[in-house]
Amino acid sequence: MNELVKGFELWLFEEGRSPKTIESYVGDIKSYHRFINEKAVDIDQPLSRFAFVRYKQYLIDRNYAVSTVNKKINSLKVYNDFLQIKGIVDGNYIQLKRDRVKIASGSEQVVTALTEEQVELLLFYLEDHKKVSQRNKLIAYLLLYTGLRISELVNCKIADIDFLTSILTIRGKGGKVREISLRQDVVNLIRQYMQEERKQSKFGDSVHLLVSQRAPKVHRDAVRDWLAIVSERLGFKLHPHLFRHTFCTRLLKKGVDLTTVSKLAGHSTVNMTAKFYIQTTRQEKQDAVERL
């Protein structure tokens, strides 16, 4: 399977895909391969309709965001094309129009964010050192207080942090660079994690800030899986992009101007920020009606 993934990565490069796109596709395919390996699927058949359908259902059952599921489906479709071109499979197992998870009409731009009560419950949960490692606590704080995309989070490097000015430099979509000011409690968590838990890891010399037990950087699926566990314990759904929604929504509620929020989020235009975050949440709409 590793050779197939390497071949896929090389093919994407030869097709002229950008480094970020290649990283995203390859990461998704590695996740799919881990799934079929765990299910003991025949390795001589790297992709089949049967395996794809079960993987898609697995993602849905694990409460992955619709956008995440559809992104992974798109990656598998490209992988299917690669396998067909190379003569490894003879079937076109994925049809995007049919297989992508549908979003209800009119809901595409409705933003769901954590309430202040939910944020409070999460913060108290993160204080339980018996349940939450230093790394995972730091992951939650970075997501909540920086609005990072999951890809930006896992690719964050120690060199991106200026401890003197408490500035985190992010290289986002399209290679765009933005700076995010870090709260002092986030800086303190980073220092604590680096001096204690991270130093004990066999990947303690990694250039990446967040390391795992098996790799020099944490995988995005590991973050999602941990958040799924926390979701079950707290009683409300958590996923990486929800934190991004919450970050932007909380800033706007506290009176931060739209331009500043747009820059912090790394949106290409202020209009994009307005499109997704000016809208009130469903709960706010309900509360407003109840006051009539």
Image (cartoon, rainbow, N blue to C red):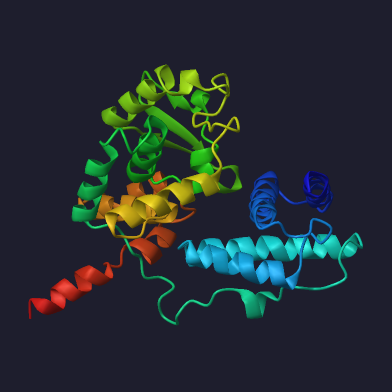
Query: In the figure, is residue 188 to the left or right of 206?
Result: left
Query: In the figure, is residue 19 to the left or right of 119?
Result: right
- What residue is drawn where x is 60% and y is 32%? 215
Residue 28 to residue 54: above or below:
above
Residue 50 horizontal/vertical position (percent): 71, 72
Q: Dividing the picture into quarters, in which one does residue 77 lie?
A: bottom right
Residue 285 to residue 112: above or below:
below
Which is more toward the observer, 62 or 79? 62
Q: In the picture, which quadrant includes the C terminus?
A: bottom left
Residue situated furthest front in the rendering: 40
- What residue is drawn where x is 86% and y is 66%? 89
Q: How many marks?
A: 0
Q: Can the viewer see residue 266?
A: no
Residue 144 horizontal/vertical position (percent): 33, 45
Residue 39 to residue 263: above or below:
below
Residue 245 horizontal/vertical position (percent): 36, 56
Which is more toward the observer, 282 or 33? 33
Which is more toward the observer, 143 or 99? 99
Residue situated furthest left in the rendering: 292
Residue situated furthest right in the rendering: 87
- What residue is drawn where x is 44% and y is 61%? 272
Residue 42 horizontal/vertical position (percent): 78, 59
Q: Can the viewer see residue 58?
A: yes
